[in-house]
Each structure stands twice: as C-alpha cells, then as structure tokens.
Amino acid sequence: MTPEEVTPLLALGSIALFVIGLKRLSKVRTARSGNALMASGMLLAIVITLIEVGLVDYRWIAGGLLVGAGIGYAIVARAQATQMPEIVARFNGFGGAASALVALSLFWSEVVEPAGDDTAFAVLGGASAATLVLSILIGSVTLSGSLIAELKLRGTISGSPRIPVRGVLMGLFALGGLALGGVAVFAIDDPITAAALVVGLVVAAVVTGLMLVLPIGGADMPVVISLLNSLSGLAAAATGFALSNQLLIIAGTIVGAAGLILTQIMCVAMNRSLVNVLIGGYGGVAAEHGEYEGVVSADAESAAMVLEAAQSVIIVPGYGLAAARAQNAVHDVAKALQAQGCHVRFGIHPVAGRMPGHMNVVLSEAEVPYELLFEMSEINQDFSQTDAVIVVGANDVVNPAANTDPTSPIAGMPILDAASARRVFVIKRSLSPGYAGIKNALFEQDNTVMLYGDAKEVLDQLASELSSA
C-alpha cells in the first residue's frame, strides 16, 4: 500500500481510539484505560500529521515530543488529586496556545516570511485565511481565560472584581480583534503591516479572555473550565480547517462537543444557565445566609455509638473532604463499618468536588472500591431507607431548600436526598454557607447532628472509635 492509502486508514484508527476512549471515560472502572486509548489516539494523530507534512526535520520533532512529554509528566506526577481541576485548566490553556501558535506559524511561513505582494487571502485561500483568524482568536481567549481560572482555583487570585459594561467591552474587543485579523488577511498586502495587525488580534483576544473569567467567582470555575475546554477544541478544529487537516478538524470537534456537553451537565446539576454563570457574582455575602436555630452538635464518640447500630450507611463526600485530604480517613471509616456488617456506599453528586469525576478521582486515590461509588441518580431513592448518612464537607448539594423553598437561589437544583435518612451526621468546620451563600436547612433538622472540625481529624476519630467497639 502507498503512503496515500495508509494515511487515511491510520487516521480512521486514531478517530476510533478517540471515540472509544471518550466512551470509556464515562465509567469509573474503565476511565483509566479510556484515558490511555485517547492518549494513544493523539500520538497516532501526531505521527499521521508528520507523514502528511513530509519535509520536516524530525530531530526537532523528536526533541519537542520529549520536552513536551517531560513537562506533562512533571506537572501530573507532582499533582495531588485535589489539584486535578487546576491541571485541567492549565492543559486547556496549553491546547488553546498550541492552536494559536500553529495558526501564527502558518501565517508567518506563508505570508510574512515570503514577503510577497499578495494578501493572505490570495496565498492561503478564503477558508484557510478566515479560520486562521478564528484559531488565533479562540486559542488566545482560551489561553488567558484558562490561566486566570487556574489561579482562581488555586486561590492566588481571589474575589470577583466588577468590570463596568463588561459585556459591551468584551464584545468590542472580540469584534475588534476579528476586524484586525480580517483586515490583515483579506485586505493588506504588506507583510509587516499584516503581522502588526495580527499582533493586535492576539492582544485583543487575550484581553477578552481576561474579562471573561476575572469577574466569575471561584465556585463557578469548574463550569468555566469545561467551557474553555470546549473552546480549546474549537480552536483546534479551526486550525485544522486552516491547515486542511481533516484529522485535526475531527479531533477538535470531538473535544469541543464533549466540552459543551459537560458544561451543560454541570449547569443542570446546579440549576443554573450558562449565561447566569458567565455573568458572575452568584451567591450572596456570607452575612446574608441567615442565623441557624436548633442546631445540634456531638463528638465522634457519640456518633460512633449510633453508627455501630446502623445496618446501612451512605457517605456523601464534598470538596471539604478533598481539601482536608481526608479520602484515606473516610475509607477507614467505611472499612470499619463494613467490618461490623454494615452496608456502606458513597453517594456522588455530579458537581461534588470541583468538577464531574473529581470526587471519583479523589476517592480512587484512597483505593475506595469502584463498586461502592454511586451517582446521584442511582442512589437517591435509597436515602429514605438508610439508617445513617455521613456528609463530609458538602453543603449546597444536600440542602433540602432546593426542593422545599421555591424562592431559594438553588430552587430546582438536583440534590442528594440526605435529609430523608433516619440520622444525618454532617462533618464541617463551621456553619458557613456554600457557594450559593445561603443557610442549609439540613443543619437545623431534628435528625441532623453536626460534627465540627477538620474532616480528616473527625474521620480518624470516628474510625478509631468504630474499630475499638
């Protein structure tokens, strides 16, 4: 077979690896192999692209692969499970930057470096010139927005600064960047002037990304990261059109579609619209959440005495568990309960942690068996027949106000029905509100007991008490 015949077959294999890998990512048990399949698909796509390009100095390519793989390994190997959303944000930014750089490279090699008298439109063609501008714009927006999202998640940037007439300014910068890029590729035959206009496009896009993400609160960053992930895919697809690379178009479209679907899932899980998230400023000031009445608290010893008699227990983990690095401690509690013959399961809300799947990753780090993890839709109907629920660091995702108070900011938000269990233990440092900025009616219920303190310390005490029973 000739290279022209082999390449399409290899491309089909790469696409198949992407699709199968993405499907396997939907289940905890198969997620690891799905990730490996998608990585293999990407490697194959790179090889195919090199074959198609032809005249390439493979020493530079090999060096780039080694350096990139080394950087990627160093980033992930040192990262803790709680930092995964930050890593995803960073890689989204890298993806957007890569697409923008490839588009800029194409513009430089085909238009600026030859220093001819033709416009980019004449050199590249209308479709390639237009998608080149879109790739630079979307890629640069993704880069700057993702960097801000990572810094917000890490806590380096705090607060949600208000930008007057933000929507108007974002529109002006985005449209202005498109106009600069359009003039550069369609109307300017001077390479230096065209290059200067493209630089203006990059600056306008970077500013647009900054204005998009800065005013949004840290609690909404997971949705923003998912949206930026979709944008990184669209940037790659646009670059594929500019290069006439069908494989890149398909891969970018898959990433873009998957990111949009995930964004929608997260918005539905929080009963929010994407527009509402992007407007920013969700949730009130902490002082507005109201005063609590009739809240009962206890210590780990008292809670253990109740749990010893329980036949069924559901553990509801939240970001507080991840932040306290308490995944091993909660697994110890689960094992101590199982040793007493108790039926133990974990109820996972779609936005538990910082993004879908984040809590599964945190618990898998502690080697919690996959068969103990249940999604909200699978376990919600069982809470009313459950002897005890242990809520660890979760807040709004178990707030019954979502079902009982139509005026609540979270009204209609799907929640874990922990309130219907016979006994509820809530492990939390204080009565501070969640991202919605409202009080949690669960804390005031007659069947709820608060266990105040650091999640890891309280769970360690519980495990100790249960093991010595």
Image: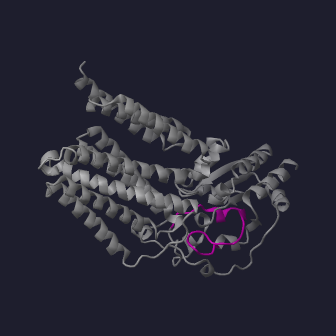
Q: Is residue 307 magenta?
A: no
What secondary structure is the stretch in magenta mostly built from?
loop
Q: Is residue 423 magenta?
A: yes
Residue 2 found in image quarter: top left
From which residue to which does the magenta span run? 413-440
The x, y position of residue 30, in whole percent, is 52, 38
| Residue ranking furthest to the right | 468
Task: In the rendered view, tell whether residue 307 sits above or below residue 371.
Answer: below
In this view, the residue farthest toward the top is: 1
Q: Nearer the viewer, residue 81 or 363?
A: 81
Residue 248 spot, x, y in % from top left: 31, 41
Which quarter shows the N terminus?
top left
Residue occupying image coordinates x 14% and y 46%: 123
Q: Is residue 273 visible?
A: no
Question: How many circles with numbers are drawn on the protein?
Answer: 0
**Residue drawn 28% across and 28% down?**
7
x 62%, y 81%: residue: 287
**Relative to residue 27, is residue 464 drawn left or right?**
right
Residue 65, image quadrant: top left
In front of the other: 194 or 296 = 194
Residue 388 appears in the picture as rendered: yes
- In the rendered structure, the answer to whether residue 165 lies left or right of residue 191 reads right
Residue at point 45% right, 36% down? 39
Residue 250 figure quarter? top left
Q: Is residue 37 above or below residue 136?
A: above
Residue 203 in picture, x, y percent from top left? 34, 62
